[in-house]
């Protein structure tokens, strides 16, 4: 069964646009404000909520407070959408309890990548920290450490590492990696060399921080995080 996503926005055109894009991979419900969203949450099992902030009746922040203060829905992840850019607005979103925060306008490929990352983190059983040998991944702070040394990764490198971690000791194909880190943008690439570039950069940064060479190339098949 596909994960269930609840989209909340007072703009019907945006709801139609996003739901049409997501419906191939997810089961999608829509609501025009926070009150409608809570009504749906009382009736349906939802795996992820994507909500605008500025809405009538009940805005996204009030909706988020209601979700996080109700034991029945507190574990449901929420991605907030807002036209407000800047570090202060982003921090406010995270402090409210949002799992991610995306500034409008955004590319659909970016939204899809954020959705995949949030759902993938939930597959780790709600744990906030993952330890893989000398590697520590702070799932809440989105930070990576080799022993006590922080590793500065780009968002794609971080998502790539999480993808390997969620498939540890399994071979993942080059195509699946390409689709994961590029989403809807995959069609613009003539080849998959960019996959090798991202993996090379990730391995280099982990090695320079003192990590072991655990991301292995499996000839003719793909790559594997070998632990």
Image: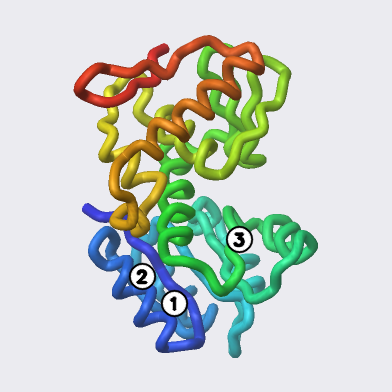
Residue in the image at 44% along x and 77% along y: 39
Image quadrant assignment for residue 71: bottom right
- Check whether the beta carbons of the residues at disc 1 and disc 3 lie within 8 A of each other: no
Residue in the image at 41% along x and 60% along y: 109
Residue at image mark 3: 101
Left-right relation of 149 to 60:
right
**Vertical placement of 125 versus 187: above or below?**
above
Image quadrant assignment for residue 48: bottom left
How far apart are labels 2 and 3 at the CA level? 26 Å
- Mark 3: few/some/many CA within 10 Å (<14, 14-19, 20+): many
Left-right relation of 132 to 92:
left
**Tag 3 secondary structure:** strand
Residue at image mark 1: 39
How far apart are labels 1 and 3 at the CA level? 23 Å
Q: Nearer the viewer, residue 46 or 219?
A: 219
Q: Position of residue 25 (x, y in %)?
A: 26, 59
Q: Position of residue 9 (x, y in %)?
A: 49, 80
Mark 3 or mark 1, which is nearer the start of the sequence?
1
């Amino acid at each position: 069964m596909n994960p269930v996503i609840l989209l909340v926005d007072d703009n019907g055109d945006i709801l139609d646009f996003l739901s049409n894009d997501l419906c191939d991979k997810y089961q999608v419900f829509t609501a025009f404000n926070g009150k409608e969203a809570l009504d749906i949450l009382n009736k349906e099992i939802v795996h992820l909520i994507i909500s605008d902030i500025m809405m009538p009746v009940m805005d996204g922040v009030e909706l988020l407070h209601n979700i996080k203060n109700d034991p029945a829905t507190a574990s449901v992840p929420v991605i907030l959408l807002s036209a407000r850019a800047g570090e202060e607005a982003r921090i406010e979103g995270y402090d409210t309890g949002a799992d991610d925060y995306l500034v409008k306008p955004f590319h659909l490929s970016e939204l899809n990548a954020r959705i995949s990352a949030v759902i993938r983190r939930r597959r780790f059983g709600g744990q906030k920290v993952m330890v893989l040998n000398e590697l520590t991944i702070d799932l809440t702070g989105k930070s990576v450490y080799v022993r006590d040394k922080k590793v500065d990764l780009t968002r794609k490198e971080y998502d790539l590492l999480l993808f390997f971690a969620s498939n540890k000791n399994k071979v993942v194909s080059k195509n699946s990696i390409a689709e994961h880190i590029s989403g809807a943008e995959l069609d613009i690439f003539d080849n998959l060399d960019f996959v090798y570039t991202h993996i090379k950069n990730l391995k280099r940064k982990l090695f320079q921080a003192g990590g072991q060479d655990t991301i292995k190339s499996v000839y003719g098949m793909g790559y594997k995080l070998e632990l």
